[in-house]
Amino acid sequence: MSDDTTSQPRRAIPHKTIAGAVTDALRERILSGALLPGEQLRQDVLAEEFAVSRIPVREALLQLEASGLVKIMPHRGAIVSSLSVDEIADVFQLRTSLEPQLLLLSARKFTAQDYQELRSLKDEYSVALDHGRVAEWGELNRRFHLALLKHCGRPRSYAIVSSLLQDCDRPTRLQLSVSGDVARADMEHSEILELCSAREFDKAADLLRRHIENAGQSLIEIYRRSATAS
């Protein structure tokens, strides 16, 4: 049998790969703020832009709806979702309740490798903050918080926090951008990590709680000012 593959017919890109590529592209635009909350996502326009049929676009929008980034509304189609002030308050209240408890369970199991990973994430986050790489802020914040909780041994609670942090991606970037509180966020991450390293776990959990509360209160104030201005 010949090893020459040049005569073999080309294979079309698998359909799921196309839908996944469209999903990834739209997710990044939403999380980066290129697509704003409330903005309509028309299947025909997106299909033309990506040079695909409407089928993978429709699948991409359904995937984004499942992750909470898009809402599919009757008579309006798909729109970029947004959180209300009440929803923001609920998300941060849940995080305040869960994350400190999970940190207490997790931090006692940290190894030297865990501390190395956490410091690397913290440093990466610091550089992104210092250089104004806004698109990376939410994801790096999420990764740091989840790394703090990775050994909690409560998979269901951990999954809930992971979902809440996903919801916080865009709001986190908004809060840091508008409030200018990047130095405080960076400092508190450093202090939480150092308290864990010193085995001051109760103090670390208390600081984590205040860290989340402060971010939530700042974001709610930003949303309320925006609503008043509009």
Image (cartoon, grey):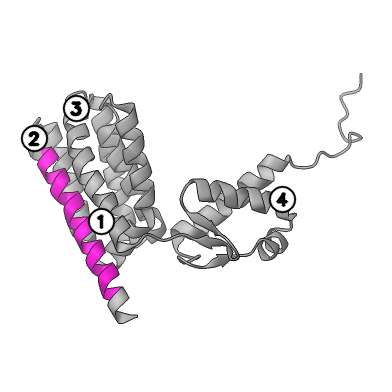
Tag 2–tag 3 contact (CB < 8 Å): no
Tag 4–tag 1 contact (CB < 8 Å): no
Q: Quadrant of residue 219?
A: bottom left
Q: Secondary structure at mark 2?
A: helix
Q: Earlier in the sequence, mark 2 or mark 3?
A: 3
On residue 55, the disc is 4
Amino acid type, label 2: Asp
Q: Earlier in the sequence, mark 4 or mark 1?
A: 4
Is 5 displayed left or right of 16 in the figure? right
Q: Residue 91 in magenta?
A: no
Task: Residue 164 in the image: state x and y as whole percent.
Answer: 34, 45
User: Where does label 1 land, which residue?
Assistant: 89
Report the Cα–Cα distance between label 2 and label 1. Answer: 24 Å
Report the Cα–Cα distance between label 4 and label 2. Answer: 52 Å
Task: Residue 43 in the image: state x and y as whole percent.
Answer: 66, 61
Amino acid type, label 4: Ile
User: Where does label 3 land, which residue?
Assistant: 105
Q: Earlier in the sequence, mark 4 or mark 2?
A: 4
Mark 4 or 2, which is nearer the eye? 4
Q: How would you rate the neighbour count of disc 3 (Cα within 10 Å): few for under 14, some for 14-19, many for 20 or more?
A: some
Q: How would you rate the neighbour count of disc 1 (Cα within 10 Å): few for under 14, some for 14-19, many for 20 or more?
A: some
Amino acid type, label 1: Ala
